[in-house]
């Protein structure tokens, strides 16, 4: 049975959990099924909050049958976990001949809201592909179930990027307590993870090109223009196409917005994704400023869950890193950071 040692860190009202997406390598390599993952999370004390990505964890998603509902709810009861957030997907390109129209998108998202309700999730992660017109038409279904919809703010977006600003303006016009945001630590990073750079070097990228990539990422101005200039120069210098193409991830998955911008969203934060990649010898995450993020969350009086999200599977093959150990390290760092911010 899961204990509640991770709940409400230092009286902040902030609780720690994990998304099963953190164990993508373990899932993909079939080391665990859903029951095994939940059992391992509970056994290692990495909850009690558990988030899942519907299309990763549930074979028939966006629908679930009675047996799947019974299995999930049985795991909740057996291991004492708390369902926190269901990750939905906005797959506008489901058809080969055209993008989904708004009616189809509304139906698609409503079905995912129904599944979240059946499984007992109070929050559904939505993506930026769901435009305001679609979100507004799904609001009735969310109200029926009492589910909050949180637009994920993931790199390369930020709390103040144009696309998110449009959503913020829409939220203000509708003014529903069920509409909010899910900030992801990936949007507020301070350096490129070493594991990402090591993977690019393994693909043949030279040290000079890797240094130039880092400088391009750190440079002001349009990030995609920075990448384009670096990529053009790198290809001209003979860098491998595979490595240069893979380097796009540096700019799409790692943002450089200031953590303080999250304060503007405080009343509408419904969940938080605590991204992490790797840790140094003292237990810090070099690529993300955890103390600054913790201070913003505490000072903004955020009350809710942070789901640890290890995304190191993009550069660490299955069997090379124990994701459960990484999650434990991240939660220890979060607990230290939140406690310090609250003190």
Image (cartoon, rainbow, N blue to C red):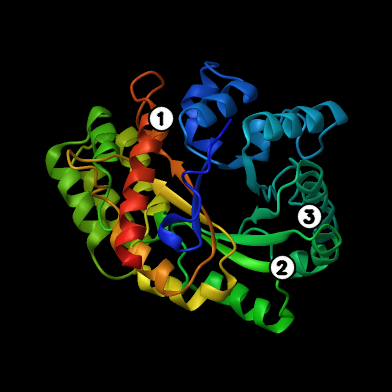
Answer above or below: position of 251 versus 53.
below
In the rendered image, residue 105, in percent from the top left (x then y), is placed at 78, 55
Which disc number belongs to residue 323?
1
Helix, strand or loop at label 1? It is helix
Helix, strand or loop at label 2? It is loop
Query: Callout 3: 10 Å neighbours few (<14), some, many (20+)?
Result: many
In which quarter of the view is residue 200 placed?
top left
Who comes first in sequence, dot 1 or dot 2? 2
Helix, strand or loop at label 3? It is helix
CB within 8 Å, label 1 to label 2: no
- Counting labels gives 3
Who comes first in sequence, dot 3 or dot 2? 3
In the rendered image, residue 93, in percent from the top left (x then y), is placed at 69, 46
Which disc number belongs to residue 105?
3
| Residue 257 in sight in this render | no
1 vs 3, front mark: 1
Q: Which residue is mark 2?
A: 178
What residue sits 78% from the left and 70% below the top? Answer: 136
């Amino acid at each position: 049975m899961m204990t509640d040692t991770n709940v409400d860190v230092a009286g902040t009202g902030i609780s720690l959990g994990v998304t099963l997406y953190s164990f993508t390598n373990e899932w993909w390599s079939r080391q665990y099924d859903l029951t095994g993952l939940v059992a391992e999370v509970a056994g290692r004390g990495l909850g009690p909050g558990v988030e899942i990505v519907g299309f990763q964890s549930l074979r028939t998603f966006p629908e679930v049958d009675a047996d799947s509902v019974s299995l999930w709810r049985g795991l909740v009861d057996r291991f004492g976990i708390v369902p926190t957030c269901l990750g939905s997907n906005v797959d506008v390109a489901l058809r080969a001949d055209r993008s989904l129209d708004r009616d189809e998108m509304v139906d698609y998202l409503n079905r995912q809201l129904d599944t979240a309700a059946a499984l007992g999730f109070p929050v559904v992660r939505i993506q930026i592909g769901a435009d305001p017109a679609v979100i507004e038409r799904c609001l009735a279904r969310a109200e029926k179930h009492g589910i909050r919809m949180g637009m994920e703010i993931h790199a390369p977006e930020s709390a103040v990027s144009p696309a998110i600003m449009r959503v913020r303006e829409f939220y203000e016009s509708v003014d529903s307590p069920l509409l909010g945001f899910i900030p992801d630590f990936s949007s507020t990073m301070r350096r490129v993870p070493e594991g990402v750079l090591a993977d690019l070097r393994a693909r043949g990228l030279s040290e000079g090109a890797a240094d130039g990539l880092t400088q391009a990422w750190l440079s002001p101005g349009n990030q995609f223009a920075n990448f384009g200039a670096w990529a053009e120069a790198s290809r001209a210098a003979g860098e491998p196409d595979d490595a240069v193409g893979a380097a796009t991830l540096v700019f799409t998955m790692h943002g450089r917005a200031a953590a303080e911008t999250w304060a503007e969203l405080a009343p509408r934060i419904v969940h938080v994704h605590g991204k992490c990649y790797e840790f140094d010898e003292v237990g810090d995450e070099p690529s993300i400023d955890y103390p600054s993020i913790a201070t913003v969350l505490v000072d903004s009086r955020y009350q809710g869950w942070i789901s640890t999200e290890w995304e190191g599977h993009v550069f660490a093959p299955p069997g090379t890193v124990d994701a459960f150990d990484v999650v434990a390290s991240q939660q220890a760092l979060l607990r230290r950071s939140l406690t310090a911010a609250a003190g």
